[in-house]
Amino acid sequence: MQPEASITKNPRKMTSVFERYLTAWVGFCIIGGILLGKVAPRLAQTLDSMAISVNGAPVVSIPIAICLFFMMYPIMVKIDFGKVIKAGKSGKPVFLTLFLNWAIKPFTMYAIATLFLGVLFRGFIGPEATDLVKMPFGLDLPLGASHGAGTVVIHEGIKMLEVPLWRSYLAGCILLGIAPCTAMVLVWSYLARGNDGLTLIMVAINSLTMLVLYGVLGGFLLGVGRLPVPWQALLLSIAVYVALPLVAGYLSRKWIIRAKCENWFKEKFLHILTPVTIIALLITLVLLFSFKGEVILGNPLTIVWIAIPLFIQTVFIFSLGYIAAKMLKLSYEDAAPAAMIGASNHFEVAIATSTMLFGLSSGAALATVVGVLIEVPVMLMLVKICVRTRNWFQ
C-alpha cells in the first residue's frame, strides 16, 4: 500500500476538459436543447424520422446510431481482449463485479425506482400524466387495445402506446440499471488509484456479457413493469449499439497496431479519440432535450424526482460492493474499481436503447439522460470516499 503522503504529492486528476466539467456540459445541453426545441421545434422530429424501418415501423434512428457509435468506439478500441483470458488470476474481483452487475443491480434498480416513481413521487409526477412511446415493431393492435400498461392511440397518423408517465420514467431507470459501466469507470478507477489493468479486463468482460444478458434482463424487467417488451428491437439494439462498435474496435485495434506500432496507437491514435465520446454524447443530449423542453418547463422538478432513486441506487450498489470487497479480503486497488464499475452506469447504451425502444421524445429517454446528469458528481464523491478509506484494506 502506498504511503498517504505519496498520494497527496502525486494525485491523479482528469486531464480532459470534457471529463472534468461533464456535469456543466450536460447543463448547457439542457439549456441548448430546450432553446432549440423552441426555435426549431421540428428539427428533432425530422432527425428522429431518419430511421431504418422494419414492417413500416421505425426501428433504428440513424442520427442516434451514428452518435452512439462514436460514443462507444473510442472505448472499445482501448480494450485488449487478449488479456481477458488472464482474468482467472483475479477471480474474486471479477466474480464480485459480475455478481453485482447482473444478479443484484438490475433488481434493486427496479425496486427502488418503482418505490419512488410509482409510489412516493407519483403524486408529484402526476397520477394521470401519460407518455407516448413507440409500438413494438411487428405488433399490430387495433386502436384502443391494451398492451401491458399502455393503450393504442393514434398520434400524428402513427399508432403509439399511451402509458402512465411514471412507468415511462421507470423504463429508463431499468435500462440504466442493466447497463454496467464500460466507459467512465476507467476514469473513476484511475482517480481512485485502482488497478487500471484489472479495470480494463472487467470492462472487456462486461462488454461481452452485455451481448447475452442485456436483452434478457431488459425484456424481463420491462415485462414485469407492464411496459412494451420489443424483443426484436432489444436484440437489434444490442447488435447495433454494443456488438458493432465492439467488433470495429477489436479489428481496427489489431490493424492499427500491426500497421504502426502499439506505442503510436496509445500515444497518437487514442489521444485523437479522447474528446470524441463526450462530443457525440453531448450532441445526443441536445436532441433529447429539444424534445423534452415542454415537460421540463411545465414540471421543473421532474429531473429531481428521477434523480433521487438513481442517486440512492448508485450509493447503495457502491456500498454493497465495497463492503463485499472488504469481506472477500481484496486489496484496495482491486476493491475500488470492483465497487465503482457496479455503481456507475453505461448511460451511452441506455440512452440509445431507450430512444430505439420508446422514442426520442419518451420519458424513458429523459430518465436515461438524468443518469448522465448525476453520474459525474456522484461518482466523484465515491472516488473521494475510496481514497479516504483505502487504509481499511490490507
Image (tube, rainbow, N blue to C red):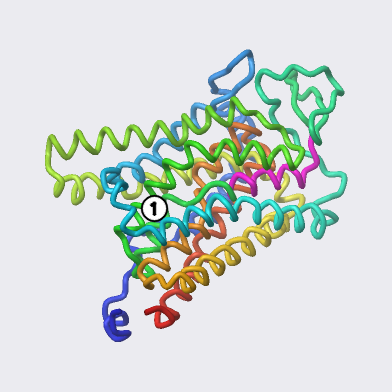
**Residue picked out by circle 1:** 202
User: Is residue 172 inside the magenta stretch?
Assistant: yes
Give the residue type at disc 1: Met
Q: Position of residue 323 (x, y in %)?
A: 52, 72
Q: Which residues are magenta?
A: 162-176
Q: Position of residue 61 (x, y in %)?
A: 54, 28
Label 1 element class:
helix
Residue that appears at 51% across and 68% down: 324
Q: Is residue 167 above or below residue 141?
A: below
Give the side of residue 356 with respect to residue 153, left or right.
left
Q: Is residue 119 above or below residue 234?
A: below
Q: Is residue 80 above or below residue 185?
A: above
Specify the principal SS of the magenta part: helix
Give the side of residue 10 with respect to residue 224, left or right.
left
Q: Position of residue 369 (x, y in %)?
A: 58, 49
Q: Nearer the viewer, residue 115 or 365?
A: 115
Q: Nearer the viewer, residue 156 or 141?
A: 141
